[in-house]
Image (cartoon, grey):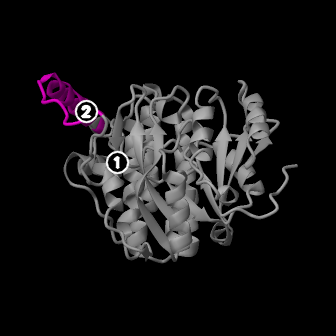
Amino acid sequence: MVNQPAHPPLLSVVVPVHRVESYLHQCLDSIRTDVPAGDEAAVEIVAVDDASPDRCGELLRAYAAAHPGVRTVHLTRNVGLGPARNAGLDVASGTYVWFVDSDDWLPPGTVPAVLDRLRAHRPDVLVLDHLRVREDGGREVDASSPLLRGVPGVVRLADRPQLLRVQHTAWNKVVRRAFLDELGLRFHAGWYEDIPFSHPLLIGAERISVLDRVCYLYRQGRQGAITSTRSGRHFDAFDQYERLFDWVARRSSDDRLRADLFALMVGHLLVVVGNDHRMDPRLRRAFFHRVARHYRRYLPVGGYPRPAGAAGLKHRLVAGDAYLAYTLLRTAHRAAGRLRGARPVEPAATATATPAVPVPAADLPSDQPTALTGRG
């Protein structure tokens, strides 16, 4: 049993841990050492060893013994990212909770900025910006980051509907614990567990605050990450979207919201089916047909904002379950991309940040990172 702190902190940072021996200290140190002097009681770290087969459990025990404010939970069997987050949530005592993945880390100054914003705005959800960090150290602005610009004070989703298109992950949101309990939200097992968790947070929130600064460094290309793994488990996305739309059906009658979510779902599933790093070619046909079935099942009666150009054409091919035509389009698109890649281009202005154009994620090529290609 994990001992509760005598005085509940303002913020609990829940860190699920599995097969991240090389990254674990970087993650934990980036949180712990960033806590302002004199404010240590405001933050606790709850690290959950998800029966990691490497030395992570041993490292966590030693880390917690050396550093007050760090608590550990050790699971006896591997349950996966979502249930491991739930295990941390069960013992977290903070007014707010933040789920940070253990292969990622925080840039300096993040924790003080988050604490200040929580105290000033008392939001239901605090949305944070992030950078993608490649294995070679290069950093990229996410395609959805421009959607966070110019959001003043505290808003609702109805005031800023573009926030629904911000990357749908748990780690870019700090959530008021009582609000989370009011919604009855927990993480489900399986891959893409963030889908039925992240969107409902924004839909249900009365008070959303946006911290328009980079507060999270999202590691790309790590071996074992689901965005870099070919597996039949990518089919889990369909179950997660079913959970999301079931939740929305019980909670909202907003036709615009359903249409926006539908467009995001189709764009996201097209990203997955078209990405060679995720989709085994032998599974692509079956996945595409599942996308078409979800399209027919959840298509809003009044239609939805279908994207223009090649992305819109892909949506139409899904609507018609036209896999052969989709394959031809995908092949032609990739051939054109290779030709463009062979042409000389001017060097980027900076090697550390490549700003993305603020377009809907579905307008981006299906084999490229978008605002909807998170770890979960």
Q: Return the x and y of residue 45 as percentages of the image width and height.
A: 68, 49
Residue 115 seen from this side: yes
Answer whether residue 332 is magenta in the image.
yes
Up-down relation of residue 196 to residue 21 (above or below): below
Seen at 55% across and 67% down, the residue is 118
Callout 1: helix, strand or loop? helix
Left or right: 335, with 250 as reference point: left
Which residue type carries mark 1?
Val
Left or right: 313, with 134 as reference point: left
Residue 169 seen from this side: no
Which residue type carries mark 2?
Leu
**Sooner in the amino-acid sequence: mark 2 or mark 1:** 1
Left or right: 373, with 83 as reference point: left
Magenta part of the chain: 326-351
Instruction: Determine the residue located farthest toward the front in the rendered image.
Output: 38
Q: Nearer the viewer, residue 174 or 183?
A: 174
Q: Nearer the viewer, residue 223 or 115?
A: 115
Where residue 318 is drawn, which disc sits there? Answer: 1
Q: Which residue corresponds to mark 2?
A: 328
Q: Nearer the viewer, residue 373 or 336?
A: 373
Left or right: 325, with 193 as reference point: left
Up-down relation of residue 226 to residue 177 (above or below): above
Instruction: Determine the residue located farthest toward the right in the rendered image.
Output: 1
